[in-house]
Amino acid sequence: MVGAMSQAAGECPQASPWSPREAEILAVTLQLLQEHGYDQLTVDAVAGEAHASKATVYRRWPSKAELVLAAFTEGVRLVGDPPNTGTLRGDLLHLGEAICQEGGQHAGTIRAVMVEVSRHPKLNEVLQNQFLKQRKAVLQHVLRQAVDRGEISAEVVTDELWDLLPGYLIFRSIIPDRPPNRRTVQALVDGFLIPGLTRTSG
Amino acid sequence: MVGAMSQAAGECPQASPWSPREAEILAVTLQLLQEHGYDQLTVDAVAGEAHASKATVYRRWPSKAELVLAAFTEGVRLVGDPPNTGTLRGDLLHLGEAICQEGGQHAGTIRAVMVEVSRHPKLNEVLQNQFLKQRKAVLQHVLRQAVDRGEISAEVVTDELWDLLPGYLIFRSIIPDRPPNRRTVQALVDGFLIPGLTRTSG
């Protein structure tokens, strides 16, 4: 049982890559981001608020964009734990609602990260390795469990659309006026994801 | 027949709100955006390239963000014409592929517009009225036609997820490394949209 849990954790690595002090600086960064937004954020303010020297911050994160991306991925890391409700529907609802919360709290940061990541291949690499890989593993874990329970067939699990649930919900979070909520997630899961994943291929 | 066509056109208004001279300035803006990106764009460069005075440009679009949003909505206006392939699947594939093209050409502009629109309520209004309203009308038109043909039942057409197809494809266009293509659209349409829209509600 412990072995199985470690294996599951190994498949969805969620351990923080940061020291407690670094994690503290990132938490301060995230808080300032939520209060003032990406453009207003300065490394000076982060260092001041975290009682760290600017050199300490810059040594670890040479640019503001790197600092912000690290703060974001660290801040949403825990939300990414694989759910285990016992049904595919329950797991998808759980994941979807967590993503809505994330999107609501960090919409401005996500928009800024998308701009920065598109400009800097190195940042993109960090996003891929520190964030997207784990998210994909969580989704795949949920689907594999549903296959094991006999809820869906293995053939419907493909790479192409692994991020349909998070992708649409993040889209809704970063456009104005229509933040997704529990009803959005239910409509998506019951109206499209479950019908699609349980379809009998013709 | 002509009456029916006018009515359909009235439901999905696609007429340009700009004079030919204004449309020309917007086309120049869009070209410079594709070449140099949002941050590098200046109203000076647009005026120079379009052989217009800066005052002329500023009189119509008082800020760079307004100019860029107008250029974007005008540039993708024509792509938004309602398809009429005779089947729901055909119409959705057609729309999806058009959105992939749009997303591929304008990813940087879309990212920048998302940031600007979130900051300026007035820009958001323009986005809603000059762009999203029309897109929603096109999607609804496609679904209504499918209802009329007996392909789907009217109850599956809801407001909550009207933008699932464009929303996911735009998400894929603005994150790095995974631009959506014809295969993405097919997987989405055949794997989720058609199964969801044709499901027999339980």
Image (cartoon, coloured by chain):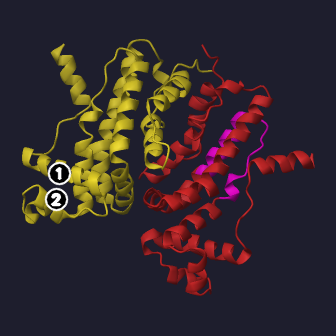
Chain colours: A red, B yellow
Q: Quadrant of the image for the N terminus of chain A?
A: top right
To which chain does the residue with label 1 belong? Answer: B
**What residue occupies the far right of the structure in this picture?**
A1
Q: Residues within 10 Å of mark 1 (few under 14, many from 20)?
A: some
To which chain does the residue with label 2 belong? Answer: B
Which structural element holds mark 1? helix
Q: Using the rendered image of the protein, determine whether residue A179 is visible from the camera's viewpoint.
A: no
Q: Give the Cα separation between the discs numbered 1 and 2.
A: 6 Å
**What residue occupies the far front of the structure in this picture?**
A122
Among numbered discs 1 and 2, the one appearing first in the sequence: 1
Which residue is under mark 1?
B28
Q: Main secondary structure of the magenta part?
A: helix
* Type of amino acid at the residue the image marks with label 1: Val
* Type of amino acid at the residue the image marks with label 2: Val
* Residue contact between numbered discs 1 and 2, judged by CB atoms under 8 Å: yes
Magenta part of the chain: A77-99
Where does residue A182 sit, x and y in percent of width and height? Answer: 59, 44
Where does residue B161 sit, x and y in percent of width and height? Answer: 48, 36
Which residue is under mark 2?
B46
